[in-house]
């Protein structure tokens, strides 16, 4: 047998053996999923390389705006204080206790700001990183606000603990950007938004991965039902109303107000309208 055939068979046999061993580890519960046990160094490095390369590829064509305006960095500091320091800390500031138990640990953003280009940081903040606890802030902040955070992170490595405390104490409330008129609902965007607002933790939704145990009704065929929550005639417009303020339509409902933006409500309503 030729050498390349022997090598190919060896690789295939090794892959098959590894797959069988992995399947056995999963089935018999050998793999430890506890947050107190860290990944091995090899797995941690593999995940790190995967994340860096994935971000670099997706951020390659992002056009970076002017980030040198000190007002932009000041606004970014206020946003960082409100949304980021709790997990990532800051010069002389430890993360909150709950963040200390996250696995993998949140990155020290002083180091990230030194090593990552602005486009990469923007993409990470906007889209989040799966299986790390880093959320997609595009559902909570505008693009302008995300760029403000990036602008602040560019100056973060130069701040001493004293400088950071002084600037954080002086930072006022963030200047909210002008609201953008909502566009027509997008079903694909709505399917993504469902994940971000944890809808799949309470409802079984066709085509959407979620928890195995649900406390709310399944949403299959929702758009064919005559009423929403048994009270409101089904239309896309009424679904938007329900998503934005369920308690005002059915007081005492277990459906919480999730703080959706009007655009996210439109997108989710458009997706739900496909469930017929």
Image (cartoon, rainbow, N blue to C red):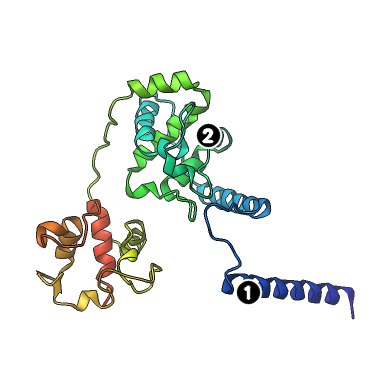
Q: Is residue 186 left or right of residue 158?
A: left
Are dots 2 and 1 in contact, CB under 8 Å? no
Q: Which residue is mark 2?
A: 113
Residue 203 numbered tag: none
User: Residue 241, how many percent across, how many down?
Assistant: 15, 59
Q: Is residue 257 above or below residue 158?
A: below
Q: Residue at x 18, y 64 (%)?
A: 239
Q: Is residue 99 visible?
A: yes
Q: Residue at x 39, y 67 (%)?
A: 210
Q: Secondary structure at mark 2?
A: helix
Q: Which residue is mark 1?
A: 24
Quadrant where the image shows the N terminus: bottom right
User: Residue 148, how many percent across, how many down?
Assistant: 38, 34
The earlier-in-sequence mark between 2 and 1 is 1
Q: Is residue 185 visible?
A: no
Residues at marks 2 and 1, CA–CA distance in whole angstroms: 41 Å
Q: For residue 170, which quarter of the picture? A: top left
Q: Residue at x 39, y 19 (%)?
A: 166
Label 1: how many residues lie within 10 Å, few (<14), some (14-19) or many (20+)? few
């Amino acid at each position: 047998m030729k050498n390349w055939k022997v090598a190919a068979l060896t690789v295939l046999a090794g892959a098959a053996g590894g797959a069988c061993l992995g399947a056995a580890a999963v089935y018999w519960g050998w793999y430890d999923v506890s947050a107190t046990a860290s990944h091995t160094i090899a797995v941690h490095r593999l995940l790190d390389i995967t994340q860096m390369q994935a971000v670099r590829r997706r951020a390659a064509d992002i056009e970076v705006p002017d980030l040198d305006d000190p007002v932009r960095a000041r606004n970014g500091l206020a946003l960082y204080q409100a949304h980021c320091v709790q997990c990532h800390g800051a010069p002389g500031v430890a993360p909150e206790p709950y963040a200390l138990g996250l696995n993998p640990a949140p990155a020290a953003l002083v180091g990230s700001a030194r090593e990552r280009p602005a486009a990469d940081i923007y993409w990470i903040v906007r889209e989040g990183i799966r299986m790390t606890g880093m959320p997609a802030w595009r559902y909570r902040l505008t693009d302008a606000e995300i760029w403000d955070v990036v602008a602040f992170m560019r100056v973060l490595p130069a701040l001493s603990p004293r400088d950071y405390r002084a600037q954080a104490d002086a930072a006022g409330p963030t200047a909210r950007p002008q609201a953008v008129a909502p566009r027509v609902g997008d079903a694909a965007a709505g399917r993504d938004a469902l994940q971000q607002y944890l809808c799949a933790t309470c409802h079984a939704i066709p085509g959407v991965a979620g928890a195995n145990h649900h406390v709310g009704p399944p949403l299959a065929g929702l758009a064919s039902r005559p009423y929403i929550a048994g009270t409101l005639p089904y239309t896309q417009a009424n679904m938007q109303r329900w998503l934005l303020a369920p308690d005002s339509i059915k007081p005492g409902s277990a459906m919480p107000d999730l703080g959706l933006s009007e655009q996210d409500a439109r997108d989710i309503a458009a997706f739900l309208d496909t469930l017929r």
